[in-house]
Image: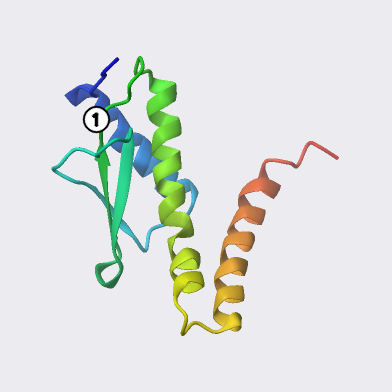
């Protein structure tokens, strides 16, 4: 079953992307909607590292599109942005172990901030 997002779906998705970008403190990235559809995916993201630009595309969801699915898909794509620097460092044969560890700790520190602020009432 084919199911392409409507313009209203795309607007809601863009709001979700901005929400997750803010929550994950990714203000050093521009995240913009691309013009072409994602191929064989609900959504995809491509990177221009020099410009710190991540371009997302929406595709065929293949299922009923709900606000919850759009929000979860936006989070998924923004997490690719969140992890991009670590992935790029890990794939570059010239990257030192120290740089990879630095990128890993950048992610761990951010996740600690996010997760610990929500666990105050747990103890």
Q: Position of residue 33 (x, y in %)?
A: 22, 44
Q: Could you tell whether 54 is left or right of 96 in the image?
A: left
Q: Is residue 100 above or below residue 53?
A: below
| Quadrant in which residue 84 is drawn | bottom left
Question: Which residue lies at the image location 39% right of the left edge and 21% below the top edge?
Answer: 67
In terms of secondary structure, where does tag 1 sit? helix
Residue at horizontal 59 percent and vertical 67 percent from the top = 104
Of 69 and 122, the residue lying toward us: 69
Which is more toward the observer, 86 or 27? 86
Residue 77 image-quadrant placement? top left
Provide residue 90's location: percent of width, then percent of height.
51, 71
Percent of width and height locating residue 34: 18, 46
Residue under label 1: 10
Furthest-left residue in this view: 35
Classify mark 1: residues with Cα within 10 Å, few (<14), some (14-19) or many (20+). Answer: some
The quarter of the picture where the C terminus appears is top right
């Amino acid at each position: 079953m084919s199911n392409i997002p409507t313009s209203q779906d795309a607007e809601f998705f863009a709001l979700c992307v901005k929400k997750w970008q803010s929550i994950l403190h990714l203000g050093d990235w521009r995240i913009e909607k691309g013009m072409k559809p994602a191929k064989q995916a609900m959504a995809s993201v491509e990177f221009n590292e020099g410009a710190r630009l991540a371009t997302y595309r929406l595709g065929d969801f293949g299922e009923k599109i709900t606000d919850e699915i759009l929000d979860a898909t936006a989070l998924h794509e923004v997490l690719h942005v969140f992890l991009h620097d670590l992935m790029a460092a890990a794939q570059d044969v010239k990257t030192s172990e120290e740089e990879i560890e630095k990128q890993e700790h950048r992610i761990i520190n951010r996740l600690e901030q996010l997760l610990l602020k929500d666990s105050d009432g747990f103890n």
